[in-house]
Amino acid sequence: MIYKRSSALFAEAEQVIPGGVNSPVRAFKAVGGTPIFVKEAKGAYLYDEDGNQLIDYIASWGPMILGHAHQPVVDAVIDKAKKGTSFGMPTQIETKIAELAVSMVPNIDKIRFVNSGTEACMSAVRLARGYTNKDKIIKFAGCYHGHSDSFLIQAGSGAVTFGSPNSPGVTQGTAKDTLLAKYNDLANVEALINANKNEIACIIIEPVAGNMGCIPPKEGFLEGLRKLCDTNNILLIFDEVMTGFRLAKGGAQELLGIKADIVCFGKVIGGGLPVGAFAARAEIMNHLAPLGPVYQAGTLSGNPLAMAAGLAMLTELNSGDIFESLAQKTAYLHKGIAKVLTELNVTHTINRVGSMISVHFCEDDVVDFETSAKGNNDTFKTFFHGMLNQGVYLAPSAFESWFLNDALTYEDLDKTIAACKAVFS
Ligand SMILES: *Cc1c(COP(=O)(O)O)cnc(C)c1O
């Protein structure tokens, strides 16, 4: 494929935008080459500025779960835009999407909308600290919770890809309150809690990790965390920015049958517009201003266009069997790729939960950041560029989950499996 125009556009962007991108992983540093500039997208396909059509396995990193430019979402946004795009005053649509979200997700009474997943996680931790009157938090190596200071400690995907797991600009004072644990290692978490008795406000976790590839929680791991939190007066925060409204109507809480104290959302909940949210039982949420002392605010929070897109998206997700259909498609892809790689003697491990899947070029099980990092990055680069040449767009980093969207047909999946075979033949 030819990327003449993308290359020219990237060179132009580099003059005025650091690294030519507004979010680092887009720059292709982990795989080499020049990022592709998108012109438009429809359903399962991206159309780039050079006129190529690509089957998209990123779906804007998750939000486009029903495919790009999904008509009900587009219509809702256009309709709202004609009536004014921001007021900084309450609107009824905020209540409507809140009611729907609360009805879909288990164990939450109230929800507050923000503008990104980063904001959601940052605010959730502040709320947990305010609620428990404790300072420290536990996060897991390889989990990503956005780019706010407290979380840039071994943060997976983008941060790992760039070799700066601890970003300059994060102060020691902040970093010391973030304790780092090993994913899927309950004993490790217990030891941290015991070493910091009565100091830990919350444990924040991706209930199914998606920023070091897709890593499912081991049997009993989340149940164990729940128990540890209960006995030590610690709040359990599920960062469901990826998994929320993707793994099930009620996200990972529903799929895995575990209750979190605070849940963070982003990605799918905005239908492709910039939306995040955090939610909990009323007794916790009532600690937020203006009811309580924990401050949190946003000029564009609850923006009518964003709420319209989110409401249209959640309404669709609430009305069908999309999650089952997506999981079946993902299982089909899993089977097809595994068969091809096995036949061609390519060492691999594939992880999958629902419509999240990742292919790791290593032999052992991938259960945490360490084992994920063992994947062969040269093979991944070959895979990435080979697939791209055949019109399949994967995430430009080995540390990312793929996100299937329901516009993908079985024909698209077959093409993808065939492309995989061609790359390694
Ligand atoms: C993407 C992501 C975030 C950050 O969301 P942004 O909207 O990019 O700020 C937080 N947590 C998880 C699990 C994510 O995947």
Image (tube, rainbow, N blue to C red):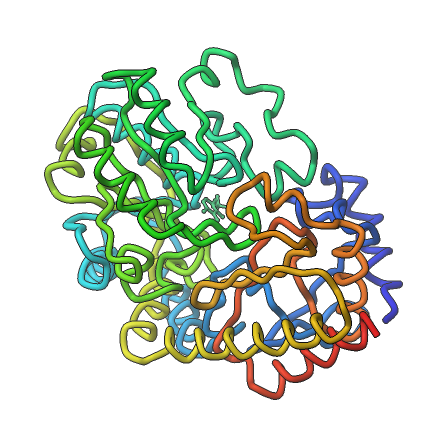
Position above or below: 396 against 291: below
Counting every numbered tag in the picture gives 0
**Residue 275 seen:** no
Q: Is residue 282 left or right of residue 61?
A: left
Image x and y of residue 103, in percent: 18, 62
Determine the residue positioned at 81% across, 60% down.
Answer: 382
**Residue 156 seen:** yes
Position above or below: 6 against 276: below
Quadrant of the frame with the N terminus: bottom right
Image x and y of residue 330, in percent: 51, 73
Image quadrant of residue 174?
A: top left
Q: Residue furthest top?
A: 173
Foreground residue, 15 or 286? 286
Determine the residue positioned at 27% across, 55% down.
Answer: 253
Position above or below: 321 against 304: below
Image x and y of residue 354, in percent: 43, 67
Determine the residue positioned at 43% across, 70% down.
Answer: 78
Quadrant of the frame with the C terminus: bottom right
Image x and y of residue 367, in percent: 51, 48
Image quadrant of residue 237?
A: top left
Determine the residue positioned at 45% across, 79% down.
Answer: 328
Q: Residue furthest left?
A: 283
Image quadrant of residue 17?
A: top right
Foreground residue, 340 or 383? 340
